[in-house]
Amino acid sequence: MELVRNWLVSLPQDLKIAFDAMDDENLPRPVREAAAGVVVYVVSPNDFIQDRNDAVVSYADDAILLRLGLEKALGAGEDEQAFRDRFPELFEGLADDLSLCKGVMGELMAWLESKVPELPKLDYKGKKAAKYLDDSELRETLYDDHIVFRTDYPVDDSTIGDKLKKTSTVLDVMKRKKAEEARAKGASVKA
């Protein structure tokens, strides 16, 4: 839980890093599209997991998907490694941290990982995330929304307080959303 708590507190700064990846023309186009999808996912009020009763918990998936999206998008290329090297606070030890999450979260982490390929295809204000790379007006709109998100973000060390003492606090919300999604798709859900 300490790892997720730290990720939640750093989410606004990490979102800035995702925005930098989106704008970095040295990165391959698919990486930039994935980064745009990450930004869209985080700033959108209608993401996969929402918990109206607890603002802290409702951002846990954002913090995890931001890391998953960037980690999976960035390949082994020189420019991609240079980008990672610019932001050691996010990328140093990330693979191990994500493995730890997978060990604790199990099938829920696999479920979140299944969302990563969809990030560049997300719709935001009627446009696919990848479109925000090519249209300067759309990019400016997304940038403004990213600034609003960072300004209005309700989680910091003081607001997180005792809200995340147990992993079940986050996992229960994700399990409910996964079950709702499965029901909507008409799939049977294991109890």
Image: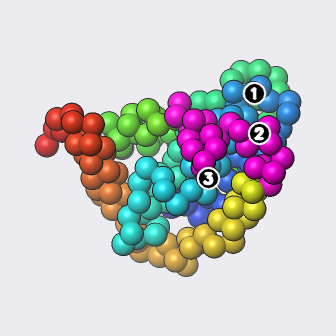
Q: Are marks 2 and 1 in contact (CB under 8 Å)?
A: yes
Which sits in the foreground, 124 or 147? Answer: 124
Q: Name the residue under label 3.
A: 125
Tell me, yes or no, whether the highlighted magenta stretch contains residue 97.
no
Percent position (x, y) of residue 57?
Answer: 42, 63
Residue at 70% x, 46% y is 18
Say few, some or many: other residues with alpha carbon within 10 Å of mark 3 (under 14 / 14 to 19 / 20 or more).
Answer: few
Dot placed on the residue nearer the N-terminal end, 2 or 3 = 3
Residue type (three-letter) at the residue carrying disc 1: Arg
- Residue 49 in percent (x, y) is at 41, 54
Q: Outermost residue, top direction?
A: 77
Highlighted range, magenta: 117-140
**Whole-Å distance between the Cαs marked 2 and 1?**
9 Å
Q: What element carries label 2?
A: helix
Of marks 3 and 1, which one's residue comes earlier in the chain?
A: 1
Question: Toward the viewer: 168 or 29?
Answer: 29
Q: What residue type is labelled 3?
A: Lys
Q: Check the image and name the residue furthest to the left.
A: 191
